[in-house]
């Protein structure tokens, strides 16, 4: 069992974000997770596409951009141009999910959908044919350092079962509340990618945290 780890720069020092992403890449990060928040879809505000294009110059690993903004269709092109390798938006934030996914895929990068804890996981099922990955939120989006919502594990299992049953190759990314004690359970449920905000960034030895999160046998 191995998983990819995506440290979230939401927990980094925004004043020196280039250095922070290099620190995570050196520690073994498989990708860098960029949390874009608009203060409307979620009660917090972070950064826009300029941050993504600026950190693109610092690291080689893929940039995994997670949009927590209303009507993401307004900005998809900007994040593609900024150098995102993977781009996701929330199913709750748009009424044109399929069109958005097609637009991202036509740009030549991976397309994902994120789903909040209170949204039925089955809402994603009609979109699976258009998706490269699903972000299953383990917390209510907006802040790092929150406690993992236990029902998330069951939701990942249900989604993994659906993906297997339909013989698709959609990745499952778990975002929020992961820690050294629950990562193996989350990976065992079917998550291929795990986001780490506070655990990776707040540790004096992020390489150790990332190695544990990678669940190498
Ligand atoms: C929450 C963000 C997460 C967050 C994860 O809205 O989408 O990416 O940074 O942080 P931790 O791992 O601390 O829960
Ligand atoms: Zn995120």
Image (cartoon, rainbow, N blue to C red):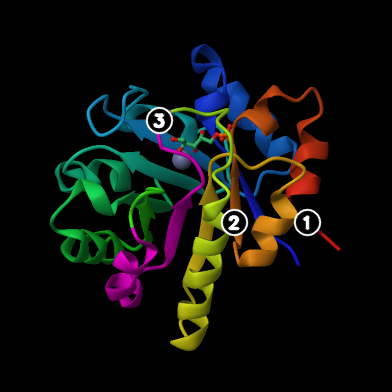
Q: Which residues are magenta?
A: 120-142
Of the numbered discs 1 and 2, the one sitting upstream in the chain is 2
Whichever of callouts 3 and 2 sits on the residue coming sooner in the sequence is 3
Location of residue 127 (image quadrant): bottom left
Q: Is residue 138 magenta?
A: yes
Category of crowding for the residue at label 3, using alpha-carbon neighbours closer than 10 angstroms: few (below 14), some (14–19), many (at least 20): many
Quote the CA–CA distance across marks 3 and 2.
Answer: 19 Å
Q: Residue furthest front?
A: 151
Where residue 205 sits: x, y (%)?
81, 28
Q: Across the whole image, how many numbered discs are drawn on residues?
A: 3
Are discs 3 and 1 less than 8 Å apart at CB? no
Q: Nearer the viewer, mark 3 or mark 2?
A: 3
Left or right, residue 144 beside residue 207: left
Residue 108 position, x and y percent, is 34, 63
The residue at label 3 has a CB less than 8 Å from ligand 1 = yes
Residue tagged by mark 3?
142
Residue name at image x 78 percent, y 56 percent: 215
The correct choice, above or below, for 54 with respect to 13 in the image is: below
Circle 1 residue: 215
């Amino acid at each position: 069992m191995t998983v990819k780890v995506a440290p979230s720069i939401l927990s980094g020092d925004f004043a020196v974000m280039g250095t922070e992403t290099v620190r995570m890449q050196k520690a073994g990060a498989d990708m860098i997770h960029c949390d874009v928040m608009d203060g409307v879809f979620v009660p917090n505000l972070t950064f826009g596409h300029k941050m993504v294009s600026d950190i693109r110059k610092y690291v080689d690993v893929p940039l995994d951009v997670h949009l927590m903004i209303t009507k993401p269709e307004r900005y998809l092109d900007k994040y593609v141009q900024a150098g995102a390798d993977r781009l996701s938006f929330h199913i709750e934030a748009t009424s044109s999910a399929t069109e958005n996914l097609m637009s991202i895929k036509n740009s030549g990068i991976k397309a994902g959908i994120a789903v909040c804890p209170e949204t039925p996981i089955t809402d994603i099922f009609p979109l699976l044919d258009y998706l490269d990955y699903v972000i299953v939120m383990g917390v209510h989006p907006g802040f790092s350092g929150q406690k993992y919502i236990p029902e998330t594990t069951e939701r990942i299992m249900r989604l993994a079962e659906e993906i297997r049953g339909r013989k698709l190759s959609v990745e499952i990314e778990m975002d929020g509340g992961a820690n050294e004690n629950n990562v193996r359970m989350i990976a065992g449920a079917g998550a291929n990618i795990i986001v780490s905000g506070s655990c990776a960034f707040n540790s004096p030895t992020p390489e150790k945290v990332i190695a544990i999160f990678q669940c190498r046998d």
